[in-house]
Amino acid sequence: MESSRKPRHQNLSKVKNIPKIVVLRWGHRRERDARLTTHVALTARALGASGVVLSDIEDEKIKETIDKITKNWGGPFFFEMRTHWKNVVHEWKAKDGIVVHLTAYGENIQSSNVLERIKSSGKDILVVVGSQKVPRKFFSESVSDFNVAIGNQPHSECASLTIFLDRFFEGKELTKSFENAKVRIIAQKRGKKVVGNR
Ligand code: SAM
């Protein structure tokens, strides 16, 4: 029997009162982190963030990959590079946004009310994820309004970003619609169905 639960696709960026989320990826090392940084950006796009800033460094190959995905699978989504992380944070705060640093050492998203406090601010959010060990300053009030742990065990930036976005958007991002998509997946019980052309 077919499921009667039809997904209601919505454009999160056009739903009123849903804050915007941008991801700041810090500490990228070209050789070591290419795949993981790409996955951070793909995850950010697919799960409702508006864009990724790869701070302090450029990696044209990753930008090409992400821009191509956005061109084919839709957006809006941006991938920017090079700006020093301090400037990204400074500009974000100047526009009244808040900074959420994902770290195993922070307030546990499950056992504390940190997500409630973040949501009740109603402000746009810059989510900071590291790669290598982040500068100590990231934990300070001058940088992060909230240090959030997706459980207090070390794991992965991709996993922590996924859980944060899913909890923040309460699953609604999973039926998000993307504008100007050239191709779209039609969900199937089996097999693969894609409409459109790249
Ligand atoms: N050795 C690094 C350190 O001590 O900070 C760990 C880097 S970890 C592989 C890369 C990033 O994943 C971290 O900077 C953080 O953003 C994220 N991360 C890892 N575990 C996390 C957790 N339990 N909660 C939230 N973020 C986490």
Image (cartoon, grey):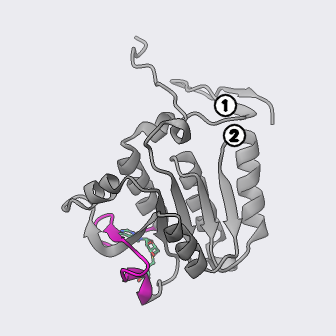
Q: Is residue 39 above or below residue 10?
A: below
Q: Is residue 182 left or right of residue 159?
A: right
Gap in angstroms between the C-alphas marked 2 and 1: 7 Å
Between 172 and 12, the one nearer to me in the picture: 12
**Local crowd size for mark 1, using a 10 Å CA cut-off: few (<14), some (14–19), many (≥20):** some
Question: At label 1, which amino acid type do we have?
Answer: Arg
Q: Are marks 2 and 1 in contact (CB under 8 Å)?
A: yes
Give the labeled residue for mark 2: 73
Badge 1 element: strand
Give the labeled residue for mark 1: 184
Residue 194 x %, y %:
68, 28
Ligand 1 under 8 Å from disc 1 Cβ: no
What residue sits 47% from the left and 56% below the top? 124
Residue 133 x %, y %:
47, 84
Which quadrant, please, contains the N terminus?
A: top left
Residue 152 visible in the shown view: no
Q: Residue 164 magenta-drawn?
A: no
Residue at the far top: name it.
1
Which numbered circle lies on residue 119?
none
Badge 2 element: helix
Residue 25 x %, y %:
56, 70
Res. 38 image quadrant:
bottom right
What residue sits 72% from the left and 33% below the top? 183
Q: Residue 151 magenta-drawn?
A: yes
**Region rendered in magenta:** 136-156
Res. 137 image quadrant:
bottom left
